[in-house]
């Protein structure tokens, strides 16, 4: 479980351009569930994930992950507890390395190593098994450089790499937004399979209300750093969500 207590954060603090994004935000994310985070552009979704991951510092508040306070941990230290997949298919992988090399790097996240030492027969078999569960044929392309994969294959590989160390929390930031609709569907399905199979606590930012509803257990709508809706996904339809989205945003505009 992730607990966020009294989170406050401004960009450009103390300047004329100060932008107060969060002002005492409280939020609990249940374990082994997928929580979708939606809201208009610029409402602070990505910033919230960056604050959780430690890529951006908070001004006030506490972040507690599975009972451990991580607020003061550095980004690299938190990286051992977190998995992340970004919108840009190049962010989560090293394009000029092979699938095998990328997986070996993800496998040894946070450890000292040399790539050559890592790529051992028993690891290769394990990586092949992990890739096989994706069902995209990547297990037969271990020596292909990642830059030659399609966007969908790359995002699926990013997902596998982000989850192979069984992170306490998986952060997905519009990870299908750069894909065509059919590939996006495929990657969403793979995402659901993986997080259910391994029971991974997930926060998924989505620009797509339909996906957010279909693939999450709970849906949270942010606006200007405030939670304006928090529901079980099964208790709300896409039309209702759309209506609330429109109304609430008009109200607070
Ligand atoms: N590094 C930064 N410096 C200043 N302002 C930023 C920075 N990153 C994001 N912002 C601003 O913070 C707001 C929230 O951004 P973001 O969290 O990326 O929104 P979302 O992901 O919900 O679209 C936006 O107004 C954005 O311009
Ligand atoms: Mg964003």
Image (spheres, helix red, strand yellow):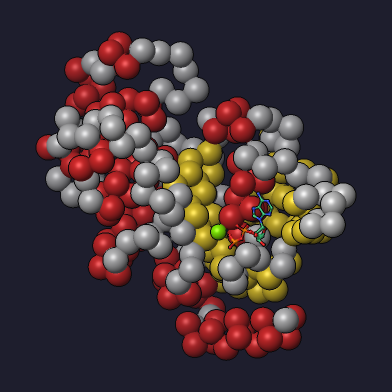
Is residue 64 or residue 14 the one in the foreground? 14
Residue 97 place in picture, x, y as percent: 28, 30
In the rendered view, tell whether residue 238 sits above or below residue 231.
below
Q: Quadrant of the C terminus?
A: bottom right
Is 20 positioned to the left or the right of 232 in the image? right
Residue 233 place in picture, x, y as percent: 52, 72
Residue 16 place in picture, x, y as percent: 84, 57
Residue pushed farthest left?
Answer: 140
Q: Quadrant of residue 227?
A: bottom right
Q: Quadrant of residue 190?
A: bottom left
In the rendered view, tell whether residue 212 sits above or below residue 132.
below
Is 140 positioned to the left or the right of 237 in the image? left
In the rendered view, tell whether residue 249 sits above or below residue 68.
below
Give the residue drawn at x 59%, y 55%: 46
Which quadrant of the picture is home to ligand 1? Answer: bottom right
Give the residue drawn at x 66%, y 74%: 229
Give the residue drawn at x 72%, y 67%: 224
Q: Answer yes or no: is residue 192 visible.
A: no
How many labels, in total? 0
Q: Quadrant of residue 107?
A: top left
Give the residue drawn at x 28%, y 32%: 96
Residue pushed farthest right?
Answer: 14
Q: Answer yes or no: is residue 180 visible.
A: yes
Residue 196 place in picture, x, y as percent: 39, 53
């Amino acid at each position: 479980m992730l607990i966020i207590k009294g989170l406050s954060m401004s960009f450009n603090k103390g300047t004329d351009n100060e932008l107060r994004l969060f002002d005492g935000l409280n939020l609990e994310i249940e374990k082994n569930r997928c929580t979708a985070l939606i809201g208009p552009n610029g409402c602070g979704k990505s910033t919230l994930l960056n604050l959780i991951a430690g890529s951006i510092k908070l001004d006030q508040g506490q972040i507690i992950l599975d009972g451990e306070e991580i607020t003061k941990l550095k980004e690299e230290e938190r990286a051992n507890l977190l998995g992340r997949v970004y919108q840009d298919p190049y962010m989560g992988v090293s394009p000029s390395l092979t699938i095998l090399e990328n997986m070996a790097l993800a496998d040894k996240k946070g450890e000292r190593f040399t790539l050559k030492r890592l790529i051992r027969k028993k690891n290769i078999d394990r990586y092949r098994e992990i890739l096989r569960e994706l069902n995209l044929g990547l297990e037969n392309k271990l020596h292909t450089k990642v830059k030659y994969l399609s966007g969908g294959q790359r995002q699926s590989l990013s997902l596998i790499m982000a989850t192979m160390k069984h992170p306490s929390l998986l952060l997905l930031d519009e990870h299908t937004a750069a894909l065509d609709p059919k590939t996006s569907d495929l990657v969403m399905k793979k995402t659901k399979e993986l997080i259910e199979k391994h029971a991974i606590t997930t926060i998924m930012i989505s620009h797509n209300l339909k996906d957010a509803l279909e693939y999450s257990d709970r849906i949270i709508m942010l606006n200007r750093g405030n939670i304006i809706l928090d529901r079980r996904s099964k208790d709300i339809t896409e039309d209702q969500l759309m209506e609330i989205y429109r109304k609430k945003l008009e109200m607070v505009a």
